[in-house]
Image: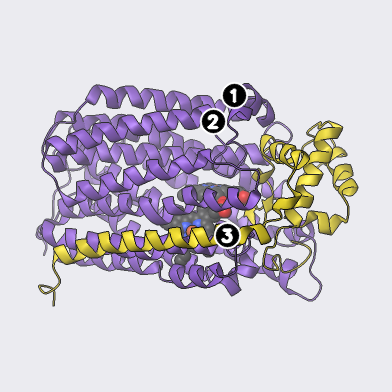
Chain colours: A yellow, B purple
Amino acid sequence: MAQAFTKAMARNIFYGGTVFFFLLFLALTFQTHSALPDRDNRQAINDTVALGKKVWEDNDCIGCHTLLGEGAYFAPELGNVYKRFGSTDAIKAFISSRPKDGIPGRRSMPQFNLSDEELTAIAEFLKYVSGINSANWPPSNQG
Amino acid sequence: MKYESQKVAKLYFTAAIGLFVGQILFGLILGAQYVIGDFLFPEIPFNVARMVHTNLLIVWLLFGFMGAAYYLVPEEAETELFAPWLAKLMFWIFLAAGAATVLGYLLVPYATLAEVTMNDLLPTMGREFLEQPTITKLGIVVVALAFLFNIGMTILKGRKTVVNLVLLMGLTGLAVFFLFSFYNPVNVVMDKYYWWWVVHLWVEGVWELILGSILAFILIKTTGVDREVIEKWLYIIIAMTLITGIIGTGHHYYWIGTPEFWQWWGSIFSAMEPIPFFMMTVYAFNMVNKRRRNHPNKAAVLWALGTAVMAFLGAGVWGFLHTLAPVNYYTHGTQITAAHGHMAFYGAYVMIVLSMISYSMPMMRGREACNSARAQSMEMWSFWLMTISIIFITLFLTGAGILQVYLQRFSDNPMPFMVVQEKIALFYWLREITGFVFLLGLVLYIASFFVGKNEPEATVELAK
Ligand code: HEM
Ligand code: HEM
Ligand SMILES: [Fe+2]
């Protein structure tokens, strides 16, 4: 048995398997790209949303929060925060009212001193994300 | 050690260990912030400490992989390194770029860092693990290319072995998939889709080739088992890795807007991802049992066996735990994920780098084969302290995660995130205390380089 299975066979399984499954992966990727327009809420993307994503990235929001379940686990999920808060105004009010020196003893979010335009943009960005079809995730409104 | 140029590895390993200490100190800051919310706030906000913690991890592992390659490739190829000067130059460039980046994180607000590094020209920042300024990323690409050139030329001019070939494929894959970090569309779903081509295809793809080849090298050296046997195992392990791991990427495509067929593809293929890790464990123990000689570096053998076991536990078992779509629906993005991330990274990649350091450092520091018995015994103490700590950290986070899932997502009246966090604080305290034990293990590890220097090398006892 040990002899029947040679190193050359193992090598061929490695190369053959890798190529085959990588090609299959590319095919599934292609399939994904064709399915995305109906799911990823791209029609909501505009300049404001683009600025919102920039604000999101420039302040590393993902370093504390999750977005669609990915990121850090220190602060609440934000993929559905628009639904949880109910409006972009509520999101803007929350972000802009964070105390500069935090809340004694508690985890607190930094004060980012965003301009009104940036506040609107980040709220619109989060609204856009909430419209992505995430297959019914998260299980509860609490994220 | 047969070739003088292998010694450049020493630089890389020294830096790796130094950055490892930094990583753990910032881990302890994070752990403290979990329970004392305003700890160091607003000077070092959680997100900043986190990017220091995770980026230092990645950078020191890269230092470790490069050091391992510089040591291993000339020995396997039976020739001097193509350009030792280039390896040294790249070391200093990489170290300087890394240090500058971490200082940037710590000294200025992240938004300012994005601005001064002109992130808008080619926005790549602000995504988990890929927080580095775009110019740092470009620097990483340059260093990686120079490194691959150096290693590739060495292999070309020397003996070609399977270990070298697999290592080179792994390192090349690492560089290639990193290029996806430059793709960052506004469309969040596409951003996330290709983000995983860096993160998942690294740790559950090409990095496993690196892991496999380093482990094979250490086993060949320490057990004296026939190279043919070990190479066959290596091929079959990495075959299983890529056959399951490539499509296994689908376990990240359940809830990010991608089509639902991924729930099937991802669940089925990633459920098989533990197989290569299991094979690795079986093979490592098999090779050690069939050894033709007793290597006097017992610490290195312990690390190598530890890698096989802990990689299987962290990646295989803890990965399987939450990889099926119906389970992941509840556990996605909770402390369960963090539990798995810690044990998998430690078990697979931290331990393989420490194995290689353990095997090669004594020789680079002028010993024949290994350290004194006293140094080895201290190193083995550090092995147990760090490994047992990470097991407990994983268990505490798993406990926290189960409660979090139940209270926040599963029960009839789901509670808000922050309320749940307070209810499970006990587990975070236990994790933090265990983190200090880990640090103690790391201190002992470093101390083991300085004890018993004037004592003779350990010898193989004539039992067996
Ligand atoms: C020993 C003390 C350590 C402590 C207290 C600690 C603590 C933490 C904390 C609090 C986080 C952030 C979790 C969040 O996002 O909310 C984190 C993330 C992380 N740490 Fe550690 N850590 C430690 C050691 C390590 C070690 C040894 C490794 C690697 C082997 C490691 C790898 C990681 C990784 C990969 C992440 C990101 C996890 C994810 O995204 O799921 N940490 N750590
Ligand atoms: C050495 C190999 C591995 C390492 C270093 C590793 C590390 C990680 C890390 C750091 C994350 C968190 C990523 C994030 O921050 O979003 C993660 C997520 C995940 N890993 Fe692994 N992993 C490994 C292998 C595996 C394997 C073999 C499986 C499956 C059997 C697996 C299943 C998962 C799943 C399902 C997630 C997503 C968790 C979620 O939905 O939140 N991993 N892994
Ligand atoms: Fe994965």
The amino acid sitting under disc 3 is: Ser
Tell me the quarter of the picture where residue A21 sits: bottom left
Mark on residue B117? 1
Residue marked by disc 2: B134
One can see residue B305 in this view: yes
Q: Nearer the viewer, residue A30 or A93?
A: A30
The chain letter under disc 3 is A
Residue marked by disc 3: A34
Mark 3 neighbour class, 10 Å CA radius: few under 14, some 14 to 19, many 20 or more: few
The chain letter under disc 2 is B
Q: CA distance from mark 3 to mark 1?
A: 35 Å
Which mark's residue is nearer the viewer, 2 or 3?
3
The amino acid sitting under disc 1 is: Thr
Q: Earlier in the sequence, mark 1 or mark 2?
A: 1
**Is B273 positioned to the left or the right of B50 in the image?**
left
Circles 1 and 2: CB distance less than 8 Å?
yes
Asked which secondary structure carries label 3, the reply is helix
Q: Is residue B68 above or below residue B12?
A: below
Residue A118 pos. (x, y %)? 80, 35
The chain letter under disc 1 is B
The amino acid sitting under disc 2 is: Thr
Asked which secondary structure carries label 2, the reply is helix
Residue B84 pos. (x, y %)? 23, 25
- The answer to whether the beta carbon of the residue marked 2 is less than 8 Å from any atom of ligand 2 is no
